Image: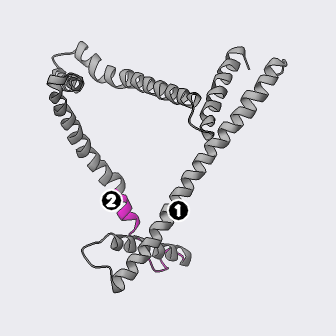
Amino acid sequence: MTSGDLIGTWIGAILTLFIFSFLYKDNPFFRFAESLFAGISLGYYIGIVSVQTLKPNLVIPLFTDFTGNWHLVIPLLLGIALYTRYIGKIAWIARIPLSVYVGYYVGINMVQKLQGEVVPQIGSTMMQLIPGNGVGVTAALNNVVIFAGVLSVLIYFFFSMEHKGLVGGVSRLGIWFLMLGFGAAFGYTVMGRISLLIGRIYYLWSDWILGTIATLGGGS
């Protein structure tokens, strides 16, 4: 590890300890590390958007071939108009580009959601429930469980009919499936956070402590 790497490792370790200090209580060290992380992330995002989006898609086309790309002036003006919200008397102008952005995002996102999530999920529930034609007993049983779960959850969210009798029983079964789904999602989230914690502890022990000892002691 070089001297430059060692300095970077120490900065990372100290900031990691600042973040861990929140386990005691909210304090200036945690707020400093949090603010630094937010500022660097925002600056990095602005740089990425400027270099990879605005420059190739707006600046270069306008300056190299304005006649063929004059229509790009429209999104440029809409983008500039967003900042009029900081000018009191003409702040209402910012509503125009904001409404265009929301409408565009909803329209394009709706198509992507339908094609990428809704339709594939509907197709995934159309499964063979009886063994045969290449589907074994275990696979058919799994398909029955998935089919029953999807049907019961949909009935639980069907509020045009009172949940009594058979509908009420199936609805309660849907609640159980929902709880299982929420529990699995929560467990997955906890595992992800624990994995991050293990990674940071390993960094502190291996890169920071052992790396510093090896570097200062003349090891590799």
Q: Is the residue marked by circle 2 packed among few (<14), some (14-19), or many (20+) residues within 10 Å?
A: few
Residue 68 image position (x, y, % from top left)? 17, 20
Residue 92 image position (x, y, % from top left)? 15, 30
Name the mark nearer the viewer: 2 or 1: 1
The amino acid at mark 1 is Gly
Left or right of residue 25, residue 134 in this image = left
The amino acid at mark 2 is Val
Q: Quadrant of residue 200?
A: top right
Left or right of residue 116, residue 205 in this image = right
CA gap, disc 2 and disc 1? 25 Å
Residue indicated by mark 1: 183
Question: Residue at coordinates 58% horizontally, 46% vertically from top-left?
Answer: 193
Residue indicated by mark 2: 119
Question: Residue at coordinates 76% horizontally, 26% vertically from top-left?
Answer: 211
User: In the rendered structure, which segment of residues is drawn in magenta?
Assistant: 118-136
Residue 160 on the magenta segment: no
Q: Residue furthest bottom?
A: 165
Secondary-structure class at tag 1: helix
Q: Quadrant of the C terminus?
A: top right
Does the magenta stretch mainly form a helix, a strand or a loop?
Answer: loop
Question: Residue at coordinates 38% horizontally, 76% vertically from top-left?
Answer: 171
Q: Is the residue marked by circle 1 packed among few (<14), some (14-19), or many (20+) residues within 10 Å?
A: few
Q: Quadrant of the N terminus?
A: top right
Question: Residue at coordinates 36% horizontally, 85% vertically from top-left?
Answer: 166
Total labels: the figure holds 2
Disc sitting over residue 98 in the figure:
none
